[in-house]
Image (cartoon, rainbow, N blue to C red):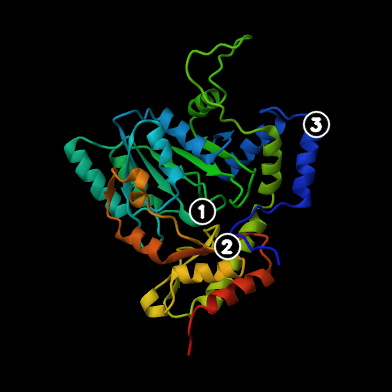
Amino acid sequence: MPRIYLSPPDISTRDHAAVDAVLTSNWVAPVGPDLEAFESAVAELAERQYAVALNSGTAALHLALQLLNVQPGDSVICPTLTFAASANPICYCGADPIFVDSEPRTWNMDPVLLELELGERAASGELPKAVIVVHLYGQCADMDPILAVCERYGIPVVEDAAEALGASYKGRPAGGMGAFSFFSFNGNKIITTSGGGMLLADKGSWIDRARFLATQAREPVAHYEHRELGYNYRLSNVLAGLGLSQLDDLSRRIAAKRAHFEAYRAALGELPGVRFMPIEDPDAANYWLTCMTIDPVEGGSSRDAVIAALEAEDVEARPLWKPLHMQPVFQDCASIGGECAEGLFATGLCLPSGSALSVADRSKVIEGVRACFVTQ
């Protein structure tokens, strides 16, 4: 039996045809009509005015921070429970990350801790240059209080919606709420361009500047003129063709992932010590990954035992993100709280959640998890 992966690419015959059509058109170079169409389609979905397609979500965040003039000596707030790519670009700019703990209601950045930290930093004259908010595992953070407190202190919000394409918050689309926002189209995301990302904003001059920097900062003259450093960050037209095809299938993918979450919760939710990621609004998440925690005392099993048992059956499962304040590379960075994120990491895992996961394979995962528990 083939291995069951956590979140593999879901590639259809339609996707193959879309890429073949781009190749047949010979629009293979970095720019072309599919790239422009992909930017427009994602901007419309996120209710944004402008977008630029890039080769990764990390590149998008890096450009956003540069456009916000983040420099050495500055600080930027970031949640601790997230992938390292949410913080690495802070360091690319020479600035210092400040990590804020999660709140248990959504596992996202705690608005109360954020407000307390900003109040203390305002009193000492050391406000951060920006706040990065991550929508974790496809569920939006509690944006209203986060946006309100950042507006009070005049701090721009960068919305990391890498995992949240198609999700929403109180009727507003993920990626449509910060000064900047960005998506990732990495191979494990809900739609993929194999590698890719997109930066979005409602200010055209910002996106024009990002596009300029992303194309090696080449001046608009006939010869190759460069007056400042640029980057090779643009997405190719070929990959944009794949992205357009995948985007047309987004609603089916969200429905499939939601079905996985509900099936896992129904089959495993009553096991002792097992709890699933709380979902504030079932119709607002995109269910990118199904996540659960296991209390080893209450359940008689553990995260590591379940991961090992599934691996023995050739099923991939992984721990939740290791909090960034626990990562050796960030050991000297400031952090606020941490107990919630640490607890989630110690007990939490992600189950196979691909939109192409079959019912039979899902049942195999369920059986593998249940075998780790002694039930009466």
Label 3 belongs to which residue?
A: 25
Q: Crowding near pointer 1: few (<14 within 10 Å), some, many (20+)?
A: many
Q: Say the numbered circle drawn on residue 168.
A: 1
| Distance between mark 3 and mark 1 Cα atoms | 36 Å
For residue 316, which numbered disc appears in the image? 2
Task: Look at the numbered discs 1 and 2 and tell me whether their residues touch, using CB distance below 8 Å.
Answer: no
Quarter-wise, where is residue 234 in the image? Answer: top right
**Whether label 2 touches label 3, CB < 8 Å:** no
Horizontal relation, residue 118 to residue 258: left or right? left
The amino acid sitting under disc 1 is: Ser
Q: Is residue 105 visible?
A: no
Task: Say whether disc 1 or disc 2 marks the residue closer to the N-terminus.
Answer: 1
Disc 2 element: loop
Amino acid at circle 3: Ser
Residue 45 or 197: which is nearer the viewer? 197
Q: Is residue 64 above or below residue 321?
A: above
- Count every numbered label the image shows and give the total: 3
- Horizontally, residue 348 falls left or right of residue 351, namely left
Question: Which badge, 3 or 1, comes first in the chain's sequence?
Answer: 3
